[in-house]
Image: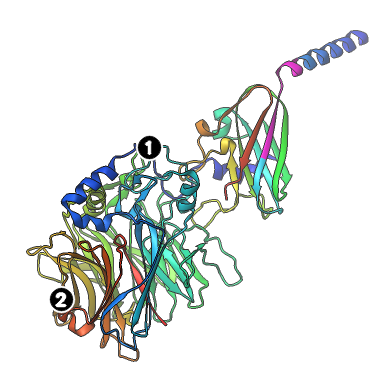
Amino acid sequence: MKTAKLISACLLAVLLGVYTQVSAETLTIVIEDIREASGALQVQVLAGQAQFEGEGAVAQFIEPAAEGSVTLTAENLPPGEYAIRIMHDVNGNDELDANFVGAPTEPYAFSNNAKGMFGPAKWEDARFTLEGDVTQVISLIH
Amino acid sequence: MQRREFSKLLALLACPWPTGALAQAGGSDWSERFALALEEFPWLAAWGNIDRDHYRSDAEISGRWPEELNGTLYRTGPAGHEVFGYRNHHWFDGDGMVHAWRIGGGGVRHEARLVETAKVKAERAAGRALYPGLAAAPPGAAGLTGPDDLNLANTSILHHHGRLLALWEAGSPYEIDQDDLSTVGPYAFAEPGGASNMRGVPFSAHPRVDVDGSVWNFGYASTAGLLVFWHIGADGSLRNAGRVAVDPMTMPHDFVVTERHLVLLLPPFHYRPRANAEGFLNMHVWTPEDPCRVLVVDKNDLSSHFFLELPAQWVFHFGNAWEDDAGVIRFDAARAPDPSIMTQTFTGIMRGDPDYARAASHFGYRLDTRARTIAEEAMLEPGIFTEFPSIDPRVGCRQYRKLVFLSQNDREPAEHGTLNAVNLFDMESGQRDSFRYPDTQIPEEHLYVPRPGSEPEADGWILGTAFDWERGRQILNLFEAERVADGPVAAAELPYAIPLGLHGKFVES
């Protein structure tokens, strides 16, 4: 029984490995126009419109900000439709600071460098297809 | 990472944030239509386009410029009406150009420069018109992150604590270098020490200077449904800010300040955003069955306020206001029956299709802050249309009796059909001293300039520009305030004419 269990586990590992090799994609995110090396970049990779417009994320990063650009890699993502949103939490208070009428005063961005119309970008503008290795180069909006 | 760490990020990046909303419209042949109309109505040149970004010339002097008049008339206005062949669909959508008329030593020098806004720079880089305006959007319009993407710095001037600011209605003031009129950039008023969460918060185009040298202003954030109030100290720092929720929002352009209160008229031109509306104006609905709300805010407690109601009306500009010891406020305004001048006239004129329906006439208002009542009364005989009211700046926010304004007598209109006379009106005697410009000239805003050392409203000049469409020249005229009908006592003429501007300030040297 013990042997059988071990074989099963090995088989599962092999199967998973094969699956990973065939179906897991790598997403490279290059964040540009970082103007201050203070605070952190908070990045969410969102799978599908529901997640984009709702809560949760398939991958999240908190990365120390460096002046210029920062590159992140999200691995083992299943192929599909994704979007990314980024904020630069310059003062490290874990919030996207807003001005007196609620508009962001810290840098942020969306995949495809999508912009909204007086608001966040729409899913249709920020979505991209992850199939094979994909790189998104995104400049922060200041 | 914990989900809650992203909660604020999600909240802000998943919901519309409060500014306004604009959508795209198709392209246009408005340039061609305007060019054709110009042959029939040559005075439309006043809404033509600039042919360069920087103008500079000594002016040709006539008459005698007084030795004691030394200073600069700073003005701004929509001037860049075409962007890479795309003609704007509204007068107020033109890229701002700041003027300096430098008066001294008996001479006048003029300089004007296009404000290098973020919009101008982005459109230059793209080689095309990118951004939506009030009435339409160019094909393939870019996304917007906030109102400052669209900031045109084209409406008025504030000169405060040594800083020259070109103002727009819905975004940040733009700081301008006073010497060469180059653009410094968007300016954010901050508290002493530099702290501010006011970056990008709308700062409207008609701030009022109080007797202590401090400045009051408001701003409106449409999708947030918020009116913002600013109080800037004489030292240039942010002294206080307040917010009042207004539902539905509208487009207030100007306001008045008294000894104790701030007063806004909120015309029933209600903000009703909808998808695919062509421009910000079209996200507003005129509902004349609704009242014009009057918002009265306590200067000492910006959260304390009350509303009164007037019949539906549209007001761009007020002259002034004051409040007596019994809490009764008097103010004046150029009052139009509806916003058609904004929604029709100022778009039609860009298309070469002039239509001057429903202009404003001057009204006086009596607002009793204790009895909570308000009444209005026409100040002039019927058929006299008015705009661009101004006062002796020394009586701002305090009791006043004299008003400067432009007018048009509907029974004797000029060929160009718009404002054609400058007036000094004594509100106590009812006497109106008026000078009618030649039909070949369209006057722009005229301001009261005090004679140095004189008593308020007693002695001064009236200073204002005019666009000579026949000769393609802009002229600065000086009137003795008490003898307006005599015509200009001095003039300064340029070898060029820049499209009609809006407002300015005279800054004494």
Residue B42, numbered circle = none
- Callout 1 secondary element: loop
Q: Which residues are magenta?
A: A19-30
Quadrant of the rendered image containing residue B258: bottom left
The tag earlier along the polypeptide, 1 or 2, is: 1
Residue B183 position (above or below residue A74): below
- Callout 2 secondary element: strand
In the picture as drawn, the residue positioned furthest to the left comes out as B411
Residue B123 position (above or below residue B220): above
- Dot 1 amino acid type: Ala
Residue B434, numbered circle = 2
The quadrant of the picture occupied by the C terminus of chain B is bottom left
Mark 1 — on which chain does it sit?
A: B
How packed mark 1 is, by other alpha carbons closer than 10 Å (few <14, some 14-19, many 20 or more), is: few
x 72%, y 37%: residue: A72
- Dot 2 amino acid type: Ser
Q: Position of residue B398 (x, y in %)?
A: 32, 80
Q: Is residue B471 magenta?
A: no
The quadrant of the picture occupied by the N terminus of chain B is top right
In the picture as drawn, the residue positioned furthest to the right comes out as A3
Foreground of the two, B39 or B34: B39
How packed mark 2 is, by other alpha carbons closer than 10 Å (few <14, some 14-19, many 20 or more), is: many
Residue B275, numbered circle = 1
Q: Position of residue B390 (x, y in %)?
A: 28, 73
Q: CA distance from mark 1 to mark 2?
A: 48 Å
Residue B328 at least partly seen: no
Q: Position of residue A95 (x, y in %)?
A: 63, 50
Mark 2 — on which chain does it sit?
A: B
Q: Is residue A25 magenta?
A: yes
x 34%, y 58%: residue: B78
Left or right, B347 with reference to B430 = right
Residue A49 position (above or below residue B326): above
